[in-house]
Image (tube, helix red, strand yellow):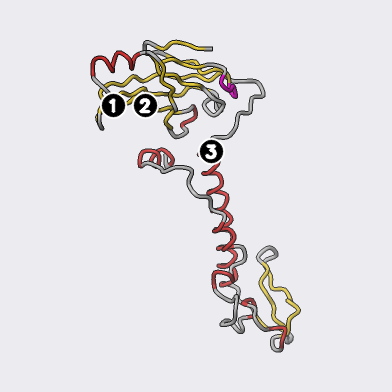
């Protein structure tokens, strides 16, 4: 269903999780074009809950610019903000700010914002990398020791040394950083010696889009 927006106020975007249930037609840019000359129209939307703002794709038709509201726009319930801008060159000539409202939908579960998915992945992989680094630090503070002719290794879960079942000398003691021998052989580099570190680093996802300084400041609040 289409709703005409021709004045400031509160824009109702629908219930949480709704997809293409309504569209907003902004008519003010047509007047701006006639009075200010050729320019560009942009709509920035900040979802409820303090999520980062993002530009909305507007469809132009005779006399209006249309916002087709998707489930990504209604994924969170509550009040948000959006700002309609008209720019000529790099200068914003006109702008209008609106309050937005997404109603709480019972049992609604809209799709996750891809930007938030990216941040969650980075946080999860970062936590795994920190855990791997903590294991490496624990190993450095509790180096292997020899008891009864075998190597004994520190177990961070039990907080005690345990018999590794490997002799302190002989073929079984070769090519393993845990026993501090043959460190110059293949696959004995420090990065690979930290269990899971290389795979954790490799799983850090590429950004879905460039992050502006303003968005970075919002994330750090």
Q: Which residue is mark 2?
A: 42
Task: Let me know if residue 68 is in the magenta part.
Answer: no
**Closest to the observer: 91 or 131?**
91
What separation in Å lies between label 3 and label 2 (alpha carbons)? 21 Å
> Mark 3 and 2 residues: CB-CB less than 8 Å, in contact?
no
Mark on residue 87?
1
Q: Residue at x 63, y 28 (%)?
A: 109
Q: Which residue is mark 3?
A: 114
Q: Residue at x 58, y 23 (%)?
A: 19
Q: Tell me the quadrant of the picture where the C terminus can be found.
A: top left
Callout 1: SS: strand
**Mark 3 or 2, closer to the camera:** 2
Q: From which residue to which does the magenta span run?
A: 16-20
| Vertical relation: 7 (above or below) 148 | above
**Closest to the observer: 144 or 88?**
88
Callout 3: SS: helix
Q: Residue at x 58, y 81 (%)?
A: 183
């Amino acid at each position: 269903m289409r709703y005409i927006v021709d004045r400031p106020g509160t824009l109702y975007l629908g219930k949480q999780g709704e997809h293409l249930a309504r569209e907003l037609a902004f008519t003010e840019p047509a007047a701006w074009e006639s009075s200010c000359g050729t320019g560009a129209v942009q709509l920035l939307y900040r979802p409820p809950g303090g999520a980062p703002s993002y530009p909305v794709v507007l469809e132009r038709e005779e006399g209006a610019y249309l916002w087709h509201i998707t489930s990504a726009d209604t994924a969170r319930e509550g009040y948000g903000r959006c700002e309609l801008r008209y720019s000529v060159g790099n200068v914003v000539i006109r702008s209008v700010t609106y309050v937005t409202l997404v109603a709480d939908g019972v049992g609604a579960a809209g799709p996750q914002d891809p930007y938030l998915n990216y941040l969650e992945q980075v946080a999860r992989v970062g936590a795994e990398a920190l855990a791997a680094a903590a294991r490496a630090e624990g190993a450095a503070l509790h180096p292997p020791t020899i008891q009864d002719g075998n190597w004994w290794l520190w177990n961070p879960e039990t907080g005690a040394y345990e018999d590794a079942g490997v002799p302190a000398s002989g073929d079984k003691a070769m090519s393993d950083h845990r026993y501090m021998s043959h460190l110059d052989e293949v696959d004995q580099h420090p990065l690979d010696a930290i269990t899971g570190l290389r795979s954790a680093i490799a799983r850090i996802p590429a950004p879905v889009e460039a992050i502006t300084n303003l968005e970075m400041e919002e994330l750090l609040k």
